[in-house]
Image (tube, rainbow, N blue to C red):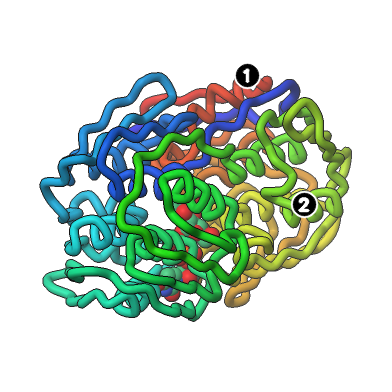
Amino acid sequence: MHKIVIKGGVPLNGEVQVSGAKNAVLPLLFATLLAEGQSEICNVPALRDIDTAVALLDILGATTERVADCCRIDATAIRSDEAPYDLVRTMRASVLVLGPLLARCGHARVSLPGGCAIGARPIDQHLKGFEALGARITLDHGYVEAQAERLRGAHIIFDMPTVGGTENLLMAAALAEGETIIENAAREPEIVQLAEALISMGAKIEGAGTARISIQGVSSLRPLEITVMPDRIEAGTFMIAAAMTGGDLLVRGARQQDQEVLLQKMVEAGVMIHPEQGGLRVVGPDKLLPVDVRTSAFPGFPTDMQAQFMVMMALARGTSRISENVFENRFMHVCELQRMGANISIDGHSAVIHGVEQLLGAPVMATDLRASACLVLAGLAAENTTEVSRIYHLDRGYERIEEKLAGLGARIERVSA
Ligand code: EPZ
């Protein structure tokens, strides 16, 4: 077990390179199951979740190889179509093998992911979509069994925009017979990249990035070659680190079009942001201004940036309100921030943040991926020393974060707990 120790109060200056997007790599890795032959995915970050996804591909019978920042996967011979519980429970995104296995093998058996810290996170919309495509779905001993001789195109309307549901159904429909329409589809940039990847494999897809996607099924697909887009959430996290510490930072790889609303809210908070040298230059103000935020599906304010924005508001001059409208339990960072002197109260899905002059270093505990990022940000801005424990959560989504931050002047190190 490790923890991260931070001596706060240092402005972050210089430049940092954003890694490949975790939430783009995961569906792309599973999309390789749709084709025989060797696929190659590059700009893949070194993250625990990626290792878990590659381990699952090995279990299913693909041969995998890591060469520099590329993953090579040959899914010619699939020997199993079961994603076991002890793996799925460590990474919910494993449910994204359902669509490809159903389309490729006509059968899949995947452990139900179960809830997680931030909410119940059911997959009912995924299953509703597969049934619409003609699959028979049964639940057995905590596993989802999906079976279909041949998937047939259908008109699917999601109850809510679901990133994973849209990705799973895109991959299944790519090999279904006839046309599939997905309405109320999620519009995240990672979905656009997945659609581009599937099209490069021979799929016929239109409308990715909008709420209505149409897919004309084809009989087979070619292997994939792609370079992963930059991680917009990692980029946003570094931008907030510069904003909170009064730093001057070039975030290389940050793309304005991936995070318009976040950028608008940061500018409203007094942060200076402008495009520069293939990234975004961020200069933190002397004093941050309070800004209200409501999270929603893309292109709204990303729920994955809610905790990070909240800790910035904890230092703003005034009162701000943040409502979390995507997940039902994503305020677990609040009690840890309160221990660092933040003045935050929760009322259901809303948090009211009264800015304070200074956060105070303290030992705190990470509970989920983005909450742990928020605690690191708090430590960077706080007086004295902050120790963040349970940082295995952090390692799921941030590549070498303490090295990257130390490179910007932060006094930060990883020590054994
Ligand atoms: C993806 O999760 C991301 N994970 C999450 O990032 C992100 O927070 C989330 O999208 C929302 O943007 C990956 O891409 C690997 P959803 P996903 O299906 O697909 C409900 C991170 O920090 N829902 O869009 O699981 C669900 O409960 C992670 O990197 C159903 O009710 O999210 C939630 O309230 C955390 N039934 C809402 O929809 C379903 O069948 C959005 O979930 C599916 C979803």
Residue 160 appears anywhere in the view = yes
Type of residue at label 1? Gly
Q: Position of residue 112 (x, y in %)?
A: 25, 65
Which mark is nearer the camera, 1 or 2?
Answer: 1
The crowd level at tag 1 (other Cα within 10 Å; few <14, some 14-19, many 20+) is some
Seen from the viewer's position, the closer of residues 409 and 96 is 96
Q: Is residue 237 above or below residue 353?
A: above
Seen from the viewer's position, the closer of residues 206 and 351 is 206
In the picture, the quarter occupied by the N terminus is top left
Seen from the viewer's position, the closer of residues 409 and 55 is 55
Type of residue at label 2? Val
The crowd level at tag 2 (other Cα within 10 Å; few <14, some 14-19, many 20+) is some
Seen from the viewer's position, the closer of residues 153 and 401 is 153
Q: Position of residue 68 (x, y in %)?
A: 40, 19
Residue 371 appears anywhere in the view = no
Left or right: 156, with 213 as reference point: left
Left or right: 172, with 149 as reference point: right
**In the drawing, what numbered circle is on residue 356?**
2
Q: What kind of element bears circle 2?
A: loop
Q: Position of residue 85 (x, y in %)?
A: 18, 56
- Residue drawn at x 73%, y 32% is 279
In the picture, the quarter occupied by the C terminus is top left
Q: Is residue 136 above or below residue 363?
A: below
- Residue drawn at x 53%, y 30% is 401
| Residue denoted by label 1 | 407
Q: Earlier in the sequence, mark 1 or mark 2?
A: 2
